[in-house]
Image (tube, grey):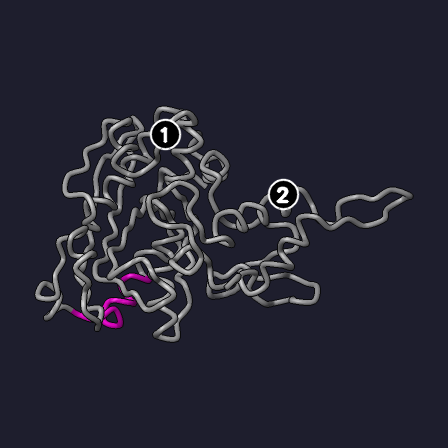
Amino acid sequence: MRWKDKAIIAFDTETTGLDLFGGDRVVEFAAVALWVGHDGRVSSQEVHSWLVNPGIPIPRASTEVTGITDKDVADKPPFSEIAEEVRRLLHGQITVAHNYPFDRNALGNEFRRLGQQWPEPLAEIDTVDVSRSVFKDAKEHKLAALCQRLDVSLQGAHRATNDAEATGRALIEMARRHDVTDDLVALLDWANAVGPPPAEGPFAVDNTGRVVFRDGPHAGKPVEEHPLHLHWMTKARARKEGTWDWRFPEGARRWARRWLDVRGSGRTRASGKSPHPTVWGLDPCFS
């Protein structure tokens, strides 16, 4: 699949705080669709953004960062009224966020409150991970620092639309500078990102877009419900012709390792946000 034939959906959330599993809520969501031209640069874009009434007071500390007040969201829709539009924007798309686990958990919690599952994008790319790979000697990988290194404009930081657009443009600029092949698998390998599992192997995609186990003790169940089994699959060996050989193909083990690294931990590796599990960093599959 040629990734430049599809839009890159860069998204960002602003929240009432960092305690996502302790009750903090989304107050702003933005998704910016960016298309890449023949020269590898952004050719066009489309912006979608909402202020969201979180149903709880916005703490002063959050307002100091985002500028969003209780008055700003008083007449705005709750997340339940925009959930389907958010799902449409993310489902089956190549998505990117800066510190992806945080934004995924923020939105994932909102969907769970509605009894809904994560929209299951085609690919999930974290520009924190890409920055760490591309700029190995950099002292920090915050969005503002990354944009400065790439000469990407970021005005009005900590507002969802501005951060989302800058994130998408930063990814595209890094891909252009590194001449990433116009192939989705190549993009995901370069970005160490989560994408579709290998067509042949122990995983399948169900009719909702979730990756499930094809067989074994958890056949038909989503991999996110059994991360420990997924980890076992990366290590499992079987006795074959007198030697211990890998039980599962390398492609499947590589995909599982990447899934656990990007989605299974839910913890950023370079951010000012606290990685402490009681704050926000621990994904519910391990909580």
Give the main secondary structure of the magenta stretch: helix
Residue 32, percent across and down? 24, 48
> Label 1 neighbourhood size at 10 Å, few (<14), some (14-19), many (20+)?
few
Q: Position of residue 33 (x, y in %)?
A: 26, 47
Rendering coords of residue 209 (x, y %):
47, 61
For label 2, the residue is 251
Q: Position of residue 8 (x, y in %)?
A: 32, 44
Task: Answer left or right for 89 relative to 210.
Answer: left
Q: Is residue 282 left or right of residue 230?
A: left
Q: Which mark is residue 139?
A: 1
Q: For label 2, count other residues whose C-alpha is less than 10 Å away and answer few (under 14), some (14-19) or many (20+).
A: some
Query: Label 1, label 2: how many angstroms apart (C-alpha)?
Result: 33 Å
The secondary element bearing badge 2 is classed as helix
Say which residue appears at 44% left-offset and 50% top-offset: 267
- Label 1, secondary structure: give it: loop
Pick the front one: 200 or 238: 238
Label annotation for residue 85:
none
What's drawn in magenta, residue-wise? 77-87
- The quadrant in which residue 103 appears is bottom left
Q: Is residue 28 above or below residue 167?
A: below
Q: Amino acid at mark 1?
A: Lys
Of callouts 1 and 2, which one flags the residue occurring earlier in the amino acid sequence?
1
Q: Residue at x 91, y 43 (%)?
A: 242
- For the residue pair 120 and 22, the one nearer the viewer reads as 22
> Callout 2, which amino acid?
Gly
Task: In the displayed orientation, state which residue is furthest to the left.
Answer: 71
